[in-house]
Image (cartoon, helix red, strand yellow):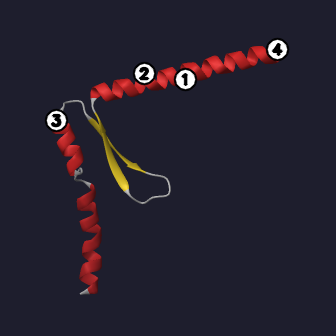
Amino acid sequence: MKRLLIALLPATLIGCAGTPPVEEQQAAAVEPGTRCEREQSTGSHMISVRCRTPAQQAQDKRDIDAMQEATRHVRSVEMKGKGG
């Protein structure tokens, strides 16, 4: 009996890995272009699914661009201060 269970375990795991979680399927059905990613928090074995609509993805990109621009501005001010 143990041998049968050990033989079936890899097939079971492979079968589960190929099916997207229900959250991903539902989010993709709600709005086209929705992208879902599986995330694992640092220090945790739990995997969560985060789905973002195209509008949310665009807002994320704007936020990242603004943060990068602010970082460039701070660095340029620091460099000017060291030269004087």
Q: CA distance from mark 2 to mark 3?
A: 23 Å
User: In the image, which disc is placed on residue 68?
Assistant: 1
- Which residue corresponds to mark 2? 62
- Which residue corresponds to mark 3? 30
Check if mark 3's residue and mark 4's residue have beta carbons within 8 Å.
no
Residue at (50, 57) in percent of width and height: 43
Of callouts 2 and 4, the N-terminal one: 2
Query: Within the image, what quadrant is residue 62 found in?
Result: top left
- Residue 72 lies left or right of residue 25; in this view the side is right
Of callouts 2 and 1, the N-terminal one: 2
Query: Within the image, what quadrant is residue 28 found in?
Result: top left
Q: Nearer the viewer, residue 2 or 55?
A: 55
Residue type for callout 1 = Gln
Q: CA distance from mark 2 to mark 4?
A: 32 Å
Residue at (73, 20) in percent of width and height: 78
Residue type for callout 2 = Arg
Q: Residues within 10 Å of mark 4 (few under 14, many from 20)?
A: few
Of callouts 2 and 3, the N-terminal one: 3
Query: Within the image, what quadrant is residue 82 found in?
Result: top right
User: In the image, which disc is placed on residue 83?
Assistant: 4
Residue type for callout 3 = Val
